[in-house]
Every structure is written in structure tokens, then in C-alpha cells.
Image (cartoon, rainbow, N blue to C red):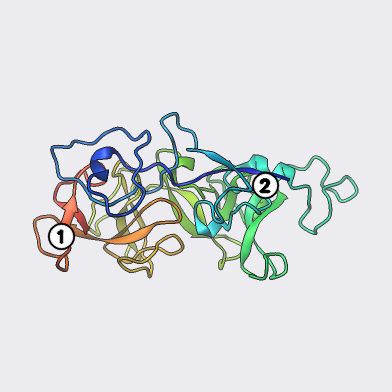
Amino acid sequence: MTHRFPLLGLAFLASAACAGLGVAGCDVRGFGTSDTSQPTVNNLTAIDAGEDAGGEPDAEVDAGTAPTSLGSPLCYAGPSSACYPDDPSTAKACGLAPDGGAYSATAGYDNATLACRVTPTTASQNGGAGVAAPACVPAGTAADGAWCKSSDECQAAFDCVGAGTCQRYCCSGNVQCAQQDFCDIQPTAQTSTVVVPVCMPIHPANGCKLLDQDGCAATETCSVVRENGLTSCVAVGSAKAGQSCDEAHCGAGLVCLGAPGERQCYQLCHTAQTECTAPAACKGGLPLFPDPTVGICQ
């Protein structure tokens, strides 16, 4: 059976933010333009791109020609995946119940509403790697932000995460999230070792100030979370500058930038100071950094 999946991470920042790129793959699609009279951040792809100008995924490819990994590596999605968490319709084609049998009336799954979720697996189920994989499971009725105790209470395309709320999957990044949300990584409520990308509310609602702890908890740091420079408090993690932040949060004072599957931590800095280690310099500018006094070390 051939599935079609969105080819993720092909849309990037506006052309002004792409000038002089050193990070591969700057391709402008549908994010408008920035003020070229101000300095711009070099070498950065979008935080979580994935749309074309019409608001749709950039491309679709047949499973036979798709890359081995699609979007966030935490979704474990590839051409051979049974389904894709961002797209509930792919679960309908699975035809298998969680016990491996067919969805049938005798098994109690007749006309069941199905969901595709990242699910713990055994080694034999996951090609020898007993970690997790997208799987077809029954869906519940709990909507976005509703309280939950387990994943099967949530609607298709949602998972029960953190302290127990249903949040939308965003394997392909911010393109899946409402404007007041951003794509973050959270542990699932029933299996804390399984961490998934989901849309989380920006907080405080009007954002936070970069390099300023005011408004964020002691366990959080202020980070850029949307392509237009919107900020939010996010959990402080263990990833250091230059390391991947696809599967772990960055440390305090860092920001996670890049397309899903290519995200990396960058050191925040003040453009008027010498906080960066030479030969790097502090570079800011639109659209990621509306405040001209803040940028990242590059």
C-alpha cells in the first residue's frame, strides 16, 4: 500500500533573512519580506516552516521516493510508517488493531475512529529498535486543550501530554499550529519516556523578553518560537549551542532554530556587546529579532 506524506521543512525565512546563507537550504516560500534596511540574521532557516504561499504543505512524495525521515525525528515517520501523526486520514488505511488483528466488528473496532500516534513498541515491531513508532490506535473525543489521562481519550491528530492535556501533533512544525501556539516537545502523559512534538500555547500570551527571565519560571527560558519573531517561555533543557534541539530543549539563554529535523541551538546575545566567542559576532534583525538589540552568535 502506498501512502503519501508531506515533504517537510522546505519552506524557509524571507529573502532578507536568507542573505549570505551558510546553513544549506534557504528557500523562500510564503513568509513575506523583511525590512532590508536593518541587519539580518545570516544562515538561518525558518523555525518550523513547511507551508507554501497558499498555506499548504510544500510538496507530497510517493512513499517509494520519500526521505527516510519526515519532519521531527520524534515522530519516527518515514516511507514505511503505518501512518503519519499530523494527518489523521492516514490511520484509516492501516486496517490493524493495536493487538495486530484487523479492525472488525468481532474485535470491537467496527467503524472505529482511528488516530495515528507515536506509540511505544517492542524491538520486533520497530525493525529491531525498541523505542517508538507511529501506530494506528482508536481515537477519543477530547478536543484541543481538554484534560486527559491517556492518549486514547484525545481526538485524532492529538496526544495526551505533560500534566494531561490533549495537544495537536506538529511533526511538520509550526505549520500545524494555530497562531497563538508553537510547536514544542512534550512527554506523553502515560509514557513519560516517549516525547513528541505538539502545539503548545505561547506564554505569557503577549510573549516574553529575550535574555530577560521576567515572566518565565525558574525552569524556563525565553525563546523565539515563531517565524515572525514571537517569543514564549519554554522549558530549559540540556542541549548546548551548536547541538540539535529536535529531541531536547536548549539550555538557558539559547534559542532553537531550523526546520524540523534540522533544528539547532544558538546562543542569544546583545548586538551592542561582545558576548560571542571570536570569530562569531552577534547578529540580529528581522524577521526573527524585531528588537534590534538582540540577536544570536554566528
Task: Select label 1 or label 2 by which is in front.
Answer: 1
Residue 126 higher or lower than 39, as above or below: below
Q: What is the residue that sits farthest to the right in this orientation?
A: 106
The residue carrying mark 1 is 281
Q: Depth check: 241 or 14 in front?
A: 14
Any mark on residue 115, and which?
A: 2
Q: Residue at x 27, y 38 (%)?
A: 15
- The image quarter in which residue 161 lies: bottom right
Q: Residue at x 30, y 51 (%)?
A: 44
Q: What is the residue that sits farthest to the front in this orientation?
A: 65
Residue type of the residue flagged with mark 2 = Ala
Q: Position of residue 200 (x, y in %)?
A: 45, 49
Q: Depth check: 143 or 280 in front?
A: 280
Q: Cα distance, mark 1 to mark 2?
A: 46 Å
Could you say whether the residue bearing mark 1 is in a helix, strand or loop? Answer: loop
Q: Depth check: 88 or 261 in front?
A: 261
Image quarter where the C terminus lies is bottom left
Q: Position of residue 110 (x, y in %)?
A: 83, 43
Residue 242 in sight in this render = yes
Q: Residues within 10 Å of mark 1 (few under 14, many from 20)?
A: some
Residue type of the residue flagged with mark 1 = Ala
Image quarter where the N terminus lies is top right
- Precedes in sequence: disc 1 or disc 2: 2
Residue 163 in sight in this render = no
